[in-house]
Amino acid sequence: YTIEKLKADLICMTMVRSLGKEYSHFTSSLMLLKSLDKGELQAAILAEESQRRRRPE
């Protein structure tokens, strides 16, 4: 385990924690993944946001 890996993990954790309460189910599903890097996390968040915008309220 390196400092760079730790920094990458902390960035991902910060990104997940910064999501609002309305994303609680989404963040729970992210925590089930075996691994997740910053790029994958950004893509997942963008995809989730896109899906939310398409849903009627």
Image (cartoon, rainbow, N blue to C red):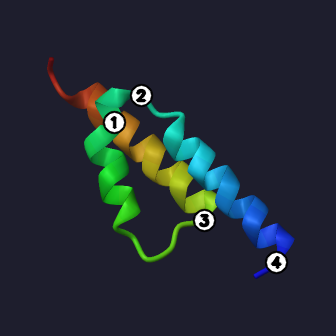
Q: Earlier in the sequence, mark 3 or mark 1?
A: 1
Q: Give yes or no for contact between labels 3 and 1 (Cβ–Cβ under 8 Å).
A: no
Q: Please state if 38 lies on the left or on the right of 28 as rendered.
A: right
Name the kind of residue labelled 4 in the image. Thr
| SS label for mark 1 | helix
Could you tell me residue 21's position as x and y percent? 34, 29
Q: Which residue is mark 4?
A: 2
Q: Give yes or no for contact between labels 1 and 2 (Cβ–Cβ under 8 Å).
A: yes
Which part of the image, by quadrant, shows the C terminus?
Answer: top left
Name the kind of residue labelled 2 in the image. Gly
Q: Which residue is mark 2?
A: 20
Could you tell me residue 38's position as x and y percent? 63, 58
Q: Residue furthest bottom?
A: 1
Q: Is residue 17 above or below residue 5?
A: above
Could you tell me residue 55's position as x and y percent? 19, 28
Q: Please state if 25 lies on the left or on the right of 10 as rendered.
A: left
Q: Which residue is mark 1?
A: 23
Q: Is residue 45 above or below residue 20?
A: below
Q: Earlier in the sequence, mark 3 or mark 2?
A: 2
Give the Cα distance between marks 1 and 2.
6 Å
Residue drawn at x 61%, y 54% as measured from the top left = 12
Q: Which residue is mark 3?
A: 37
